[in-house]
Structure formats: structure tokens, C-alpha cells
């Protein structure tokens, strides 16, 4: 099965089975997403961890461990796309500079 077909199939199955991202972990240093937690379609008490490793998604479920595109990676992939789009449309913080006189910072407390 081609990669896109496998992802499409996994997305469809995830939607059918109700697999969803339940948590996102970010790097403290960069703010980048490092892992996502998803529900399991076979066991409601189980969660799966999908890690972002060098631009690839790795899931701890048995299907993914054997090379398949699992539902957990599919929903995580879609969530990453949503997060990327949100970041692109989020207003950038305005950089501020301290007030200066003759090139020296002004201290308002003197």
C-alpha cells in the first residue's frame, strides 16, 4: 500500500474508532512539540505515545512497531498540521527596545 493510501486508511479508521490526541508535550527550551498522547481504539483504558523524532513520528503501539501506519500516528500527524497552521497565523510578539538617551538605557527609577 502506498504511503499516502496507508495514511488515508489510518485516518479513516481513527475517525471510525474515535482515536484522538489527548495531550501534547513540548520542549521547555524550544517550545517544539516532542510527543503526543492518543487514545487507543482497542482498549479505552490505554493510551499510546507518539514521539516526534528527527521529523518522523514513532508510536509505541504494536502495529506501528511492525512498520504499519497506525491510527495514533495519523491523528498525531493531523494535529501537528493544525498546530503548525495556528503558529503561522498567530501574531508575532512585537520586539520592544529600552528607551535610550545618548545610546544609554534610561532608568525610570532614579
Image (cartoon, helix red, strand yellow):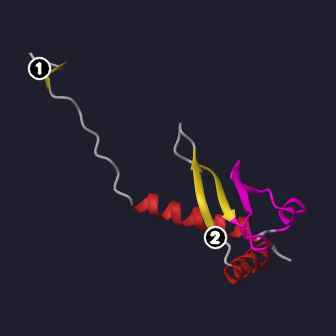
The quadrant of the picture occupied by the N terminus is: bottom right
Residue under pointer 1: 109
In terms of sequence position, does the residue under pointer 2 or pointer 1 come before the other? 2
Name the residue furthest right.
66
Q: Position of residue 12 (x, y in %)?
A: 71, 82
Residue 75 vertical position relative to residue 34 in the rendered view, above or below: below
The disc placed on residue 92 is none
Q: Secondary structure at mark 1?
A: loop
Range of residues picked out in magenta: 39-68
Q: Secondary structure at mark 2?
A: loop
Q: Quadrant of residue 95?
A: top left
Mark 1 is surrounded, within 10 Å at the Cα level, by few (under 14), some (14 to 19) or many (20 or more) other residues, namely few
Q: Is residue 57 magenta?
A: yes
Mark 2 is surrounded, within 10 Å at the Cα level, by few (under 14), some (14 to 19) or many (20 or more) other residues, namely many
Q: Is residue 61 magenta?
A: yes
Q: Kindly identify the residue that appears in the image at 73 percent across and 65 percent down.
A: 45
Q: Kindly identify the residue that appears in the image at 14 percent across and 20 percent down.
A: 107
Q: Quadrant of residue 16?
A: bottom right
Out of 103 and 71, give the one closest to the viewer: 71
Residue under pointer 2: 20
Q: Is residue 4 left or right of residue 83?
A: right
Give the spatial CA distance, label 2 vs label 1. Answer: 52 Å
Residue 92 vertical position relative to residue 96 in the rendered view, above or below: below
Q: Are marks 2 and 1 in contact (CB under 8 Å)?
A: no
Q: Position of residue 5 (x, y in %)?
A: 77, 79
Give the mark count. Answer: 2
Q: Position of residue 56 (x, y in %)?
A: 72, 55
Q: Position of residue 60 (x, y in %)?
A: 80, 56
Q: Nearer the viewer, mark 2 or mark 1?
A: 2
Q: Kindly identify the residue that appears in the image at 52 percent across and 61 percent down.
A: 83
Amino acid at each position: 500500500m502506498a504511503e499516502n493510501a496507508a495514511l488515508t486508511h489510518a485516518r479513516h479508521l481513527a475517525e471510525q474508532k474515535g482515536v484522538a490526541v489527548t495531550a501534547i508535550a513540548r520542549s521547555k527550551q524550544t517550545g517544539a512539540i516532542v510527543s503526543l498522547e492518543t487514545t487507543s481504539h482497542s482498549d479505552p483504558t490505554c493510551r499510546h505515545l507518539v514521539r516526534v523524532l528527527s521529523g518522523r513520528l514513532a508510536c509505541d503501539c504494536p502495529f506501528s512497531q511492525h512498520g504499519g501506519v497506525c491510527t495514533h500516528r495519523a491523528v498525531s500527524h493531523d494535529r501537528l498540521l493544525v498546530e503548525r497552521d495556528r503558529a503561522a497565523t498567530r501574531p508575532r510578539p512585537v520586539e520592544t527596545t529600552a528607551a535610550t538617551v545618548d545610546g544609554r538605557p534610561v532608568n525610570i527609577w532614579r
